[in-house]
Amino acid sequence: MKQVVNISLEDKIEKFIEDVVEDDAKDILYSLADDVIFWSTPTVDTGAYITSFSFNVGAGRPRGKSSKNKPRRQSPQQKAAEGRENLQRDIDKLPDLVNKESVQLRNEAPHAQAVEDKHGYKVFAKVRREYG
């Protein structure tokens, strides 16, 4: 008796493509996170701004730390590491990036606009220029 096995290549190829796209999307977000932290490191005083970045895809509570009553002259390297870890955790939790049209990068620190404009660091302007 003859034995036949049909293998659905379509499903396997579709799954492979989804996995590749998901990995590529995460790689882009990890690169973005690294750049945001790098561009923000010179801003560190209390660390509230650099640790207030977050990624999300819609609903969710963004980070927003106030610098009020926080100790000043914090280690930029330590706060940068903390900010990077926050963003990496966010990326790892993002659901189904293959089917998302966009991901939001936010900074809800009360003084985020002042860091961007008044103090001239232009972190979000750099993100828009580099990542659109």
Image (cartoon, rainbow, N blue to C red):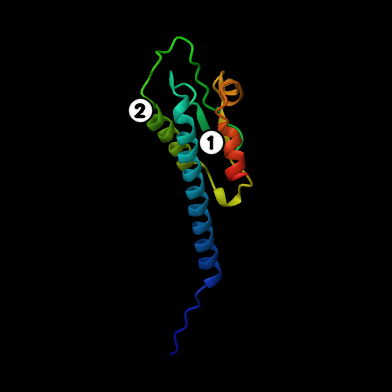
> Where residue 2 sits in the image (x, y, percent)?
45, 89
Query: Furthest residue to the front?
Result: 120
Amino acid type at image mark 2? Gln
Q: Nearer the viewer, residue 16 or 55?
A: 55
Query: Furthest residue to the top?
Result: 69
For the C terminus, which image quadrant? top right
Q: CA distance from mark 1 to mark 2?
A: 20 Å
State which tag comes first along the sequence, 1 or 2. Answer: 1
- 33 left or right, relative to 100: left
Q: Which residue is under mark 1?
A: 55
> Where residue 8 sits in the image (x, y, percent)?
53, 72
Answer few, some or many: residues within 10 Å of disc 2's Cα (few below 14, many 20 plus, some between 14 and 19): few
> Where residue 19 sits in the image (x, y, percent)?
49, 57
Residue 45 falls in which quadrant of the image? top left
Answer few, some or many: residues within 10 Å of disc 1's Cα (few below 14, many 20 plus, some between 14 and 19): many
Query: Furthest residue to the bottom?
Result: 1
For the N terminus, which image quadrant? bottom left
Q: Nearer the viewer, residue 96 or 74?
A: 74
Amino acid type at image mark 1? Phe
Compared with residue 69, is residue 23 higher up or lower down, i.e. above or below?
below
- 51 left or right, relative to 10: left
Say which mark, if any, is on residue 78: 2
Q: Nearer the viewer, residue 112 or 126?
A: 126
Instruction: Look at 60% across and 50% down and name the residue there.
Output: 99
Instruction: Look at 58% across and 44% down and name the residue there.
Output: 130
Whether tag 1 and tag 2 are in contact, CB under 8 A, the answer is no
Compared with residue 17, is residue 120 higher up or lower down, i.e. above or below?
above
